[in-house]
Structure formats: C-alpha cells, structure tokens
Amino acid sequence: MDPIRIRWTIPCLALASFIRGVMALVIVKQLGPTTVSTKYGDLRGALVEFPADARVGLQPVEAYLGLQYASLQKGRLRFTTASSPNERWSGVHSAWDQKHVCPQQILKEKQLLRNLPQGTVEWMTRKGIFTRHQTEDCLSLNMYVPKRDWNETDKLPVMVFVHGESYEVGTGNAYDGSVLASYGGVIVITVNYRLGVLGFLQTGDKEAPGNYALWDLIAVLYWVKENIVKFGGDSKRVTLFGHSHGAALVNLLLFTNEYEEMRQASHDLFTNVILQSGSALSTWAMSIDAKRCTHMLAQKVNCSVAINKYDSHKLVECLRQKSVDDLVRNVPVTPKYFTCFAPSIDKSMNAKSMFPMGKSLEELIELRNSRFASIKMMVGVTRKEAYSYLTQGEIENGITEIRRTQIMRTYVQNIYMYNRQQIYDVLDHEYKQYEGVRDNFSRRDEIMDMLSDGQFKAPLLKMAQEHSKRNDTYLYSFAYSTQSEDYSHWSGGVHGDELPYIFGAPLVGGLSPFPSTYTTPEIELSKFMMRMWTNFAKTGDPNLPEAGATNSGNPYYPEERWPKYNISKQSYLHIGNIDRKGSKVKDFFKSRETALWTKLIPKLNEPDNNTSETGHQLENAEDMSTFDDPSRLITQFRSIFPSPPPPPYTPPVTPHSVTRGTRRRQKRSPQVTLYCRCPLNKWKVTRDNLPLW
C-alpha cells in the first residue's frame, strides 16, 4: 500500500489529512488497497480505520473524497443546469482530499449570537470550519465504502445524505459517513450542491429557471446510477435522506415528473427517502416570490436598470457579471418564516420548470402516477424543532406575556391572509397552559411548541399522512438530548439532535461537528438508530433484515417492532428517555395539533364574502410595537417587492462584446445539460407573478 504523504499517528488528528478541522477518533494511515476503474480514470481512496478501544467492532472503510459529479465550467454555467463531469486523469488518482464548498456567507460568532441561542451558534461555528474554502465550481461528493474481502460480491445499498441547516449555508463535507457505512454495511455519500442565490435564483422564464440545487441533486443520482457498481454499490437500492432544508429538497424531488422521458428514466434513481425535520409544506421550504426576490437582488447589486417584465436576458447577463461575493452578500431579507432564494414551483406555465406546469404542490401530491406514490418513506421530528427561533436570553430566562404576544402576532400576520384575528385567538387558546402557574418559562415552552408544530411537525405529518395512503410510511419522534449539551436538562431533543447518533459519533468518541462526550446508553442509542436507518435503506422496512438482531444484548433499547404509520391509528416509534427504556411504540402522535394546523386553520384562512378587507386584519395592526421584528413583517415588503419601471438598458462593454469597433450582443453562457432532454421551443412570453399576500 502506498502511504499518504502525511501520516497521522495521534488519534485526535485523525482524518485531518483530507477533512479540514476534523477532531475524531478515526485514523487514516494510508491509501486504500482497492483501485477502482471509472470512465474518468482510476481511483484509490483513503483507508479509514477505527480505534481499537471503540465500543463496537468497526471494519475499515475506504473513503473516496472530492469526486466531481457535475461541472459548472468554472462558473460559466451560472444560473443554469450543470454539465457532466469534466475531470479526467491518467494514472491512479488519490481521492483523499475534499473539494472546496459552494459559496456562502461566513458569519462570526458575535453576529450569530444576536439572534440565535448559544447551542445553535456552537453548532454552526463547528460546521464553519468546513466552509472556509469556497469555489463556484463546487459540485462534488464524498463516498464511504465498507472494505470487504475479495469473495464478498453482494452489492451494497447506497445512502445519499442531503445536508440542511438552511438554503444559504452548509456543506456535505461536514458529515463523516465512515462510521455509518462500517456499522450498517452500506455505502454513504454526502454531497455539495449550490446554495442561496446561486442555487435558486429565478426570473420566471427560460433565462434563469431556478431550482439549480434540485438539478444538482438529480445529477448526483445520475452519477450514482452510472458509477456506483464500480464501488460495489447497488444502483437499484438508493435511499435519499435529508435533514431540515435538505429534507425539503428530498421531498420536492418526489414531484419532478414534468417530462415523460425524464420521468421514465429517473423513476429508478432512488427507491426510499428519509425526511428528518423538514418537508416541502413548511413555509420556509419554498420561495415566497422567486421572481421578485431576483428583482430585489438586482436593485442591491446595481442591475435594476436591466429589469424588463417581458425579457429577462439582460438582467441575467448583468447578474452573471457580478462577483460571487456581491451576490452572496446582497441576498435580500424576507418576511419572517419565509425564504427568498429557495425552490419554487412556477404555476404560470411560462418558465422552464422541473415540475408539472400549472400545478401547485398540493395538486402534485394528489397525482397518482408520481414518484411520491412509488417510493417508501420514513419521516421524523425532534421535540423542540423551533429552538433556533429564540435567543439565548429567552432560552435561559423565558419570555414575558408581551413578548409571547408579539411573536404570535407576527407569525399570524406573516403566514395567513384572512381572518387573522380569529386565527390568532385560536392559537392563543390552544397554546396556553391552563393547569399550574404560568410564568416566563411556561410561556417560552408555549411559543416553542407553537412554532415547532406550525413550522415543522404539522407540515411533515401532513406529508406523512398523504404518503401513507399510497405506500409504506414510518414515523419516529426523537425526544432526547445529548447529556453533554447545556440544554439537555430542558429540551428533550432540539432540531438536529438526532444527527450525531445517525452518523455514529458516540461509537468513536465524537465526529466533528458533533459533541465528543457520550455516555454508554448514548452509544447504544447510536447503534440502535444506525441499524434502523440502514435496515430501511436495505429493504424499505426498518425492522428488516435483522429484526431479531437489531437490539440483541441492548438493555436500553429492547426489541420492539416499528409499525407502519397510517391514518386510522397513526402509530410511531418514540425515541426518548433512555432511563425509561429508550424506544417504544405509541399511537396518534400530535393528532390534535396536526388537525388544528391542517384542517381548522386552513378553513379559517379563506376569504369571507361578508368580511371586508380590514376585517381580515389583526386588532391594532397599525401599532408596530405589538409585533416581533417589525422590519420583517410581510406588510413591510409590499412596497419593496414591486418591480421598478425599466429604464433604457445599455449593456456593459466587455472585451467579448466588441468586434472591430462594432457593438454586438454579448455571447450567452452555454446552456449545457446531460440530465434532462427538455424541449426549449414552447416557452411563452413571461409575465409578472402576483404577490403571495
């Protein structure tokens, strides 16, 4: 075996040779023994070994890092779909170093602490180590393959993880899949996809159709389909699992059936999905107004002169000439609980869309021949999903009645259009503690529960209910916090608390960016969850293929079969307090709250012929002091979103736009894609989208 140029002999520096900043008890000493022949050239990965004192025997893993799955041609394909990988090499390429991540803002700890609790800031700071080195041509993946003997020929299932955090920050480089791959006997892939303005900017026509991050993920799946067999993987058993915003992206991929050729070709790109703390039905999951967000950005980067309601070509060309830093730093602020640059489903039938034209998400869910109906699904939430919506002071000291009212009024004002006061009264009643003494801490918990249900749990449960009518669905509730975390005594599981257990951090004394200290029961919790997740990837059933051995000898997680979720019984697996036998099957998870958010409130949020426009407003709506963060009220954006009248546009002169003293139209960036054979001759003239409020 050829040694890597730098040998790490101290466990705490493990993996640092190819993952910048990692602190983990996994050891890389040399290149792996396997040479993989691909159409791009021959590859060897890094051999990942585990410490001898690990709590469970882990076999070595070969990590192939920084593999290009698609190319943006050094930024020339900005605001369009990517081309096939263009990297080629002769000889044997050592794939032991991760590639630079996609462009994103790096916020300092002091900036983050203004609006976020300490736990979230620490989590983001640890992940920030992986985002220091950025490039626009960033489409790469990292693959972790269990090392097997020469006579082991069974194809391994594949798990592709889509990171979340938000649509504007994050990277797959931060998630080490080696422990999960080794323990579960699966191939684990983490990916980098375009973020923020570069991942979602849309003009409402074919000039910038948006959803580039989703096209990136489709490119990943095509790469897996074409190449995974070379690494011992099974292209017919691919599971997508995503967290938070990554889960919303995975969810949306179930509805991308616009073109018949694409639909037939991509039905077998994946077989199962796992949605962790996110779905396409949350208000933050889709762009509030994709086209107008683009116009707002144009104003901030001096491209507003190019705005034309009938032709977006000049606007897109202007934005392409801006630096990445200019675009990333000038993303407009949106109303609270919404996102600007995010996935979008264009109903105008004027844009090149990856979704069936003219249909809303709700209509797509009802389609019987979609991928949504053909795959198996696991979904789950944590107890305190909305932890990051409060500040550290509010977490520690609770909130006053005035503050509770401000938060709730802002939520209702921004999310709903009709009968706002009635909706507010309903939520105020349903999320108020009537037994015991109410204080600042009980009010904190009331708001936390309301935001968790409205923004995460109810939308995901509605998606699970719709899916359970069509195919196998499994639901879990994660209600446990790592004991080493400061908020463990209070929260019982916040957004993201399940991730270290799924990636096996407790088994090796921690994997960055996760905590490094775990108890013996927490190690058993990790083993239990990895078995459930990888069983689902293997068979579409978390109980199989090793139901009898799943919890063999595990005193904290006795064997209990995980039933399917259905409308009538709504059974789910509760993963909670280890001292009380950590997992148990329960029925009717949040059924009352889900009915409130998905049945009653939507009926109230409908126009009433007997109610005037002012009748739909909150009481005392003119008093800004009664709202949380008034600058982010949706009413404040009505005067910002409308496009300014387009003045005459003069394209900038560049070396490529002048020939022999005669001005000519600047050459467009090439529109190259190998992932969709889409007809481009049927587009109609675009028109402005109407505001959503």
Image (cartoon, rainbow, N blue to C red):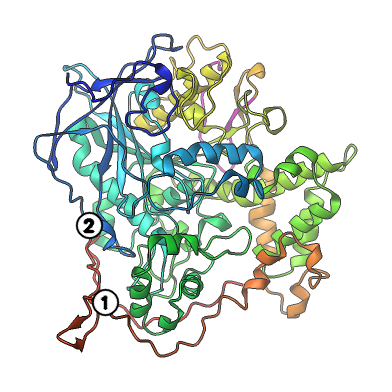
| Residue of label 1 | 654
Image spot of residue 29 (x, y percent): 28, 19
Residue depicted at 38% across the width and 50% down the height? 102
| Residue of label 2 | 83
Q: Which amino acid does label 2 sit on?
A: Ser
Image spot of residue 293 (x, y percent): 50, 70
Residue depicted at 22% across the width and 37% down the height? 228
Image spot of residue 131 (x, y percent): 43, 44
Which callout, 2 or 1, points at the residue further toward the start of the chain? 2
Residue closer to the observer: 146 or 193: 193
The quarter of the picture where residue 369 lies is bottom left
**Furthest residue in direction right, as rendered:** 437
Residue closer to the observer: 471 or 344: 344
Q: In this view, does 612 lie to the left or right of 172?
A: right
Q: Which element carries disc 2, helix, strand or loop?
A: loop
Q: Can residue 9 be seen in this view?
A: yes
Q: Is residue 32 left or right of residue 51?
A: left
Magenta-colored span: 557-576
